[in-house]
Amino acid sequence: MNIRSLGRRTDFIFARFSGSVVDQGSYTLIKTPSNPGYHWGNYIVFDRAPRAGDLNAWKALFDQQFPYYSVPHHYAFTWDTLADDKGDYQQFLDDGFEFDSAVVLTATALNKPVHFNQDVSIKRIQSDSDWEAVVQLQTLCADPKFLNSSFDAFKRSQMDQYRQMSQAGKGNWFGAFIGETLVADLGLFFEGDIARYQNVGTHPEYRRQGLCGTLVYFAGNWAFDKFGVKTLVMEADPDYHAARIYESVGFTRSEVNHSLSWWDKGQSNP
């Protein structure tokens, strides 16, 4: 299966580091056995959008390919179509799935933000205390619908992967600080000359101060200068204001990806 979507291809930067990406012909299988609670680390990419009647077959395939879930834990499906093809997914909605869309934005150069924040210091996250601060801020910024008794373990496992990637020279995690307080953070990791942003977050008490644009601008230029990156990639909710912030610093919308997911609300994480 030849993956055409740049968003999907850059997702695999992370999957290959801590798990596996296996081409199965009409679908691609992504597995992260070390973090089974992470449902977007354990999912299937199909070569087409869903059709009426696919529900049971797609779920059965997932159950077969992910035997480390003894009972239904989650289902996560996406598809690789460059056209904005949502398919026929009503049967999935009727079964309790959520349908989501994400816009993929790219940039080959960045503009300094209009509201560039001069009051923060930005640095790579390296010390144990700074990584702990990142875990706390990422948790604070998480969508409440994903918070459950297993979220802390999931987030720590996820951030440990990013820390290992940083230590392996695959990219960096960056933090914006006011004094000793971490007020915004993000990751930026690369493969070849393409880099992908991860988990851009701003402390709720420090929003609307230009922190997001400032941090994206700083990290992107770091990637251009230090990693030899030529293209920056990120995903965002097409209807959320963050996409407009990214566009203001030089990103343009290149594609839209769609997904379907169901999860046990008490046990699994995004």
Image: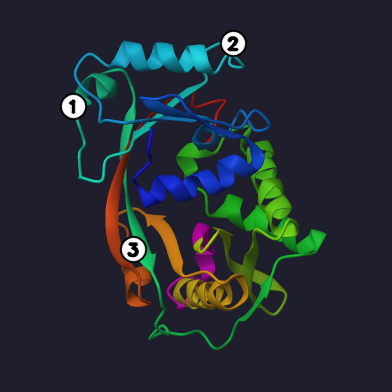
Crowdedness near tag 3: few (<14), some (14–19) or many (≥20) residues, C-alpha within 10 Å: many
* Residue at position x 53%, y 74% in the image: 215
Element type where label 3 sits in the image: helix
Q: Quadrant of residue 248?
A: bottom left
Q: CA distance from mark 1 to mark 2?
A: 29 Å
Residue 107 vs 235, above or below: the answer is below
* Residue at position x 55%, y 11% in the image: 71
Q: Which mark is residue 243?
A: 3
Q: Earlier in the sequence, mark 1 or mark 2?
A: 2
Please provide the residue range marked out in magenta: 195-210
Q: How is the image coloured?
A: rainbow
The residue at which mark 1 appears reads as: 88
Question: Is residue 262 in view?
Answer: yes
Query: Is residue 13 found left or right of 172 in the rendered image?
Result: left
Residue at the far bottom: name it: 118
- Which of 25/236 is in front? 25
Query: What residue type is disc 2 on?
Result: Ser
The residue at which mark 2 appears reads as: 70
Query: What residue type is disc 3 on?
Result: Ala
